[in-house]
């Protein structure tokens, strides 16, 4: 059976990591959905960003983005994935704007890019089995909503339900998203092993308990 992981940056638990505070260019704001009222923002192509004030000690391979949860990866991450034969769908470059109060030199920064979750959707969630209560998609914008309180209680039960999804292996994505949304990424064990082999930094893996 294929082993899957939830993959994201580890900034909250690893000291000395910079974080993107603002996306100053490249994030389109389409306003609230007229049906459900949820705000709609979409990254388009290359983006320009500013870092936060947190003092940092190194440039990581996964970079946190606080303004909008882009999945931001370094060229070192991309090179490692290519060497391991992993397909990665990029949305554009991520470049930095001053001022920079992180303590890191922008001249020494690696090239960063963001991964386009819409282009690598390769699995369908079983929302009830994953603990989502009253999950539904807006007919106008397609954004997922659910009962936040009941879902929190369900997902924090002992034991928690874990993510349950059906991964379409034929699409060829080992770094992928689901219909949960384009900013929540999962991966196969191959990526886990590749990251360990190449010593990639600031990467968090959490095992997914189940698959349909």
Image (cartoon, helix red, strand yellow):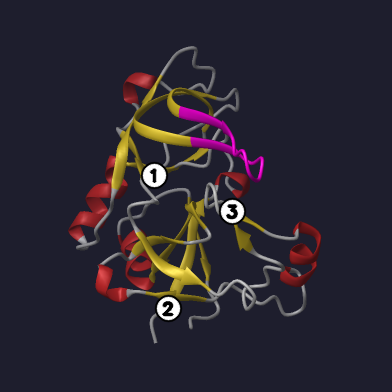
Residue at the (69%, 60%) spot, across then down:
146
- Please state if 120 lies on the left or on the right of 62 as rendered: left
Q: Is residue 62 visible?
A: yes
Mark carried by residue 138: 3
Front one among 165 and 3: 165
Q: Residues within 10 Å of mark 2 (few under 14, many from 20)?
A: some
Q: Is residue 31 magenta?
A: yes
Measured along the vertical axis of the image, is residue 83 above or below residue 11?
below
Residue at the (48%, 83%) spot, across then down:
212
The image position of residue 36, as x and y in percent, is 65, 45
Mark 1, mark 3: which one is toward the viewer? 3
Quadrant that contains the N terminus: bottom left
The image position of residue 148, as x and y in percent, is 75, 57
Residue at the (37%, 33%) spot, across then down:
44
User: Which residue matches tag 1?
Assistant: 61
User: Which residue matches tag 2?
Assistant: 3
SS at badge 3: loop
Which of the two labelled residues, at mark 2 and mark 1, occupies the earlier sequence position? 2
Separation of marks 1 and 3 at Cα, in angstroms: 35 Å
Magenta-colored span: 28-41
Determine the image quadrant of residue 45: top left
| Residue at the farthest top position | 99
Separation of marks 2 and 3 at Cα, in angstroms: 31 Å
Q: Is residue 92 magenta?
A: no
SS at badge 1: loop
- Please state if 193 lies on the left or on the right of 132 as rendered: left
SS at badge 2: loop
Determine the image quadrant of residue 186: bottom left
The image position of residue 74, as x and y in percent, is 33, 41
């Amino acid at each position: 059976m294929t082993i899957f992981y939830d993959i994201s940056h580890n900034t909250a638990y690893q000291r000395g990591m910079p974080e993107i505070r603002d996306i100053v260019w490249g994030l389109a704001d389409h306003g609230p959905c007229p049906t459900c009222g949820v705000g709609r923002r979409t990254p388009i192509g290359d983006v320009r960003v500013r870092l936060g004030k947190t003092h940092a000690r190194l440039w990581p391979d996964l970079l946190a983005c606080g303004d909008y949860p882009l999945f931001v990866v370094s060229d070192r991450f991309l090179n490692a994935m290519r060497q391991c034969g992993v397909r990665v769908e990029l949305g554009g470059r991520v470049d930095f704007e001053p001022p920079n109060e992180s303590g890191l030199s922008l001249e020494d920064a690696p090239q960063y890019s963001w991964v386009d979750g819409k282009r690598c959707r390769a699995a369908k969630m079983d929302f009830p089995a994953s603990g989502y209560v009253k999950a539904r998609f807006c007919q106008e914008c397609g954004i997922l909503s659910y009962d936040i309180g009941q879902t929190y209680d369900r997902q924090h039960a002992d034991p928690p339900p874990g993510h349950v999804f059906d991964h379409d292996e034929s699409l060829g994505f080992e770094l992928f998203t689901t219909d949960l949304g384009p900013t929540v990424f999962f991966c196969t064990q191959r990526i886990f092993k590749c990251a360990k082999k190449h010593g990639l930094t600031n990467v968090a893996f959490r095992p997914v308990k189940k698959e349909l």
